[in-house]
Amino acid sequence: MTDGSWLGLFAAALGGGATVKIIDIVYDQYRRWRDRREVDAKVVDRSLEPLLRATDELVGKLRSLGEQDFVPLRDLPQDGLDNEGFASVVYLFVQFWSEVEIVRQRGLSVDVARSKRGRQTQAFFRCLESRKLRLIDRISQRAIGESALVDGRTMNFVEYVRHFDSDHYARRWVAPLIAILSKTWDTDARQLILQYLVVLHAMIDTLDPKHFVTRVRPGIPNKLSTKSWKDLNYRVFKLYLPELRDRQKYIGPPKRRP
């Protein structure tokens, strides 16, 4: 066999070995990436479950009130949390905002950046805190959520009412929420709460599409005004949730002025 033949065989063997090595490296990197994605998804899932449960409770209550134009809420004493019915509505908002703060404080920034559900969660948080949609200012919302935390968890209903009665700061921070819930006789206040409800509803459908944690509920688009429909369709969804599908489930077909 000539020297040229030996050199050819040596080069072919060397090339084959290098190719196998490259394939091994690429596969190893892919496996690590896949395992990291699975771990990230599990971390996000565990973190979001309490948030989804709290959101589901709030959506259920607001939807029931919205169907009745908030009349049951208007008929309750609204000067504090002495009335159990009014206090329960306030608490559902407090519980939701508290779970939002827990998600934030767990430092999911890296996981969120790598997880589709995490990125979706961030988008909904930004939407709910946007100037056009939020019920109260951001610092009050966050203060309400933080004030309801104890030992890294959200206070239950009895704990929070007791905390409200005994702590001046708890009453101070929740005052803006009580104020907006005390104005449901006003059309603008009702429509703002309904818009907030629509985004919460879309949030649980998006983050829990198979409804393992939440319940399947129809929307109540018939309760939205023409202005609310336009605000949600052209501002809220278009700017903050452009990837949201089936918008008509939540806001219905375009509304026309009579």
Image (cartoon, rainbow, N blue to C red):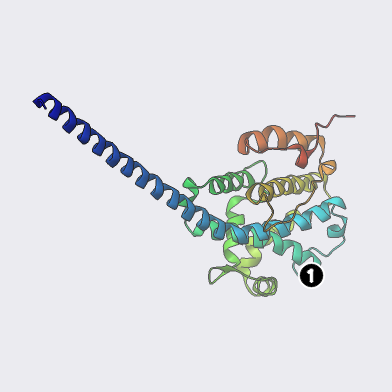
Residue sitting nearer the eye, 219 or 116: 116
Q: Position of residue 67 (x, y in %)?
A: 86, 51
Residue sitting nearer the eye, 92 or 179: 92
Q: Is residue 86 left or right of residue 14?
A: right
Q: Quadrant of residue 4?
A: top left
Q: Name the residue under label 1.
A: 84
Can you say whether 98 is above or below 229 in the image? below
Q: Is residue 217 left or right of residue 51?
A: right
Residue sitting nearer the eye, 25 or 82: 25
**Residue furthest out toward the front:** 1
Q: Position of residue 166 (x, y in %)?
A: 65, 75
Q: Is residue 205 left or right of residue 182?
A: left
Q: Position of residue 172 (x, y in %)?
A: 64, 63
Can you say whether 183 is above or below 257 in the image? below
The residue at the point 69 percent across, 59 percent down is: 93
The residue at the point 67 percent across, 59 percent down is: 213
Q: Which amino acid does label 1 sit on?
A: Glu
Q: In this view, does 11 lie to the left or right of 222?
A: left
* Residue 108 seen by the camera: no
Q: Position of residue 36 (x, y in %)?
A: 43, 52
Q: Is mark 1 on a helix, strand or loop?
A: helix
* Residue 252 seen by the camera: yes
Classify the position of the N terminus by image quarter: top left
Classify the position of the C terminus by image quarter: top right
